[in-house]
Amino acid sequence: MEESGKKRIAILGSTGSIGTQALEVIGAHPDRFQVEILTAGSNAQLLMEQALKFKPNAVVIQDESKYKWLKDQLFDQGIKVFCGDQALAEIVEMDTIDLVLTALVGFSGLKPTMKAIESGKQIALANKETLVVAGELVTKAASEKGVNIYPVDSEHSAIFQCLAGEFHNPIEKIYLTASGGPFRGKTYDELHTVTRAQALKHPNWDMGAKITIDSASMMNKGLEVIEAKWLFNLRPDQIDVVVHPQSIIHSIVQFEDGSMKAQMGLPDMKLPIQYALGYPERLKSDFPRFDFMKYPSLTFEKPDFEAFKNLGLAFDAMFRGGNAPCILNAANEIAVDAFLKEKITFTGMSDMIAMCLEEIAYISKPNLADYSDTDKATREFARAISQKQGIAR
Ligand code: NDP
Ligand code: MG
């Protein structure tokens, strides 16, 4: 912590949905937080605007073709500019950082997150794919380094909030709530013909494209089940999913005496982001407050594993362990990308993931290099099968 008592924060992925909301939170609490590092993939314009406003020590742009332009814009501001994957992974080692918010999307978050943990930085974790791919390695490294991982994902933040003051009481079970997304109630056959535009319209949350498709296909909940296993050190059979279309109850913990604690509030990612950044304090906010009369009933349903095959695939991968979740994640990243490019159908995404899980070699105790190899092999195989009948549009 700096002498001023401000927490110095690095945001990986500051130009995304989580990144921009995190900057809103920080902007509302200038006495508590200071932006130390900002990074983006290719959106140099927004990164520049953020840098001018928040005056970080340094920025990183992954896309090297944007480097010169960005450097020209920021050089007289005393803000250092770096580019490329290597710089992104290494910037988190700077000793002026107290906490790293990982808001990158997909497998790209793994290396910088590991580096941040290895250099002892506290983590606010939005990038769930990191824990899905390599949860065992990541959580082991964190406990060895005494690093806390504060969840940003709303469901996991809910569980974390329910566990405050309960750390010695064993969890019997957790229930992750799911909105069900835009296709709740549709049959498997109906899902075959849904379009990209329909899938991108989430009823309750406004998020990046990848997670929005994951929410429509229920893969998001599948990834969150695996994320929860590692964050809260649970057995697979202790995790359940319940569909709750209003997204007011963000998740539930059941203890061994049968008591259940739930965390609720309007769906707004700024709340879990702020909790992760400000922990253990609850900072005052002007976020809209919940009005019971606007929600006369909160309802619950069973998830439909028949229609949403991804959810079952994710549970299976979690039970298999080893590199299976890594295969699931890589296949899903390629599938989502192909669906967004309108190359494959919505249900074709699940077919692609299932084929990858069958085809790619299983490793029971993978190391970091095995995860990279599995990720690469799965992506190649998934790209090759995207032309297959039944998957292709
Ligand atoms: P976005 O797509 O909106 O943002 C992703 C960010 O990462 C952007 O800053 C983007 O830069 C950058 N980026 C993307 N690819 C790369 C790359 N290869 N190398 C370096 N930087 C890259 O995603 P979200 O904010 O929606 O999600 C971020 C993470 O948080 C995901 O893991 C998601 O699952 C999780 N999450 C998100 C929620 C939400 O409400 N959005 C809720 C819960 C979890 P650029 O803008 O330049 O492309
Ligand atoms: Mg979530």
Image (cartoon, rainbow, N blue to C red):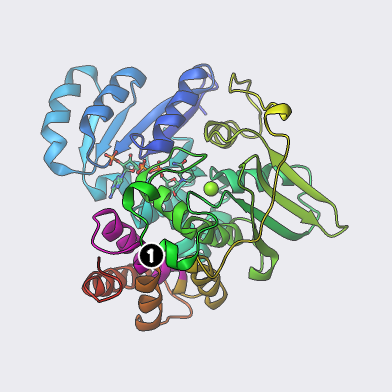
Name the kind of residue labelled 1 in the image. Answer: His
Tell me the quarter of the picture where residue 238 sits: bottom right
Tell which of 368 and 65 is nearer to you: 65
Q: Position of residue 218 (x, y in %)?
A: 49, 58
- Kindly identify the residue that appears in the image at 33 percent across and 34 percent down: 15
Magenta stretch: give its range: 325-348
Work out whether residue 345 can be spotted: yes
Name the residue nearer the viewer: 219 or 166: 219
**232 shown above or below 383:** above
The C terminus: image quadrant: bottom left
Whether the magenta-drawn stretch holds residue 336 is answered as yes
Crowd rating for badge 1 (residues with CA inside 10 Å; few <14, some 14–19, many 20+): some
Look at the image and tell me whether residue 370 can be seen: no
Q: Which residue is mark 1?
A: 192
Where, by quadrant of the figure, is residue 368 drawn?
bottom left
**What is the secondary structure assignment of the residue under circle 1?**
loop
